[in-house]
Amino acid sequence: MTYYEVTMQHNADSLLALSRMQYDLFCTRNRIVRTILSAILVIIGVLNYSAWWGILLLAYGCYLTTSTYVSPDRTAHKLTAQIKQSGKPFPCSRYCFENGGLHIFAMPENKELDPLPYSEVERVGESASYFFIFRDQFGGYMVPKDALGDKVDGFRKFIEEKTGKPVALKASPFRRMLARMKRREDEPYHL
């Protein structure tokens, strides 16, 4: 039985979104170290702004803060350039979410690829426009929310239940808190 069936046509923006979510979900340690180092450098730079090296530390600390996605963006742009250079269209896939796992079909040939059992899903993420399902740290799939229509909340619950993984939200801390509060309201009362 197919619970959800979605077609995903990639473009340059979707590859960028996929690359950034992959970075967010799998490079947490890098982001934490980068943030701490940035804060330390900015503080030292501000305290020593009259020295040339203080200004240099301040500038580098600010660069670390503002360049979080340089690496994933470079990867996405490189992949986009390779696709355009090949003259082939961007990848298109059809996903069938069934009871036992995710069945993936390469379009337009409608050729079935290796299915993905829900137990093998490494991480699940969500942004304003997409759900992301990662097989591992090297590759994942995107489900456009537009294709789900009014079934977005149902899909989120379905994928969390089937994979046993919480959906990581890519949003501001305030929006994440609101989403968690909404989910708690939907849960049955606990004693």
Image (spheres, rainbow, N blue to C red):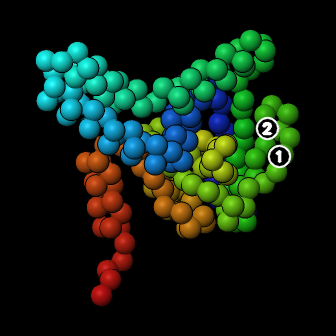
- The dot on residue 15 is none
- Decide which of tag 2 and tag 1 comes sooner along the chain: 2
Residue at the spot 74% in from the left edge and 56% down from the top edge: 116
Residue type beneath disc 2: Ala
Q: Dot 2: what SS?
A: strand
Q: Quadrant of the N terminus?
A: bottom right
Question: Quick check: 30 above or below 75?
Answer: below
**Badge 1: how crowded within 10 Å, few (<14), some, or many (20+)?**
few
Give percent across and percent down for residue 167: 48, 56
Relative horizontal placement of residue 118, taking residue 74 as reference (left or right): right
Judged left or right of residue 69, residue 7 is right
Q: Nearer the viewer, residue 79 or 1?
A: 79
Quadrant housing the C terminus: bottom left
Compared to residue 98, the image places residue 111 above or below, namely above
Q: Observer-nearest residue: 125 or 157? A: 125
Which residue appears at 72% of the width and 19% of the height? Answer: 83
**Number of dots carrying numbers:** 2
Q: Is residue 131 visible?
A: no
Q: Is residue 23 something one can see in this rendering?
A: yes
Q: Find residue 159 and report its horizontal and vertical position in percent.
A: 57, 59
Distance between the Cα atoms at labels 2 and 1?
Answer: 7 Å
Tag 1: amino acid: Leu
Circle 1 residue: 113
Residue carrying label 2: 106
Question: Residue at position x 48%, y 26% from top?
Answer: 70
Question: Does the residue at mark 2 contact the one at mark 1 (Cβ under 8 Å)?
Answer: yes
Label 1: which secondary element? loop
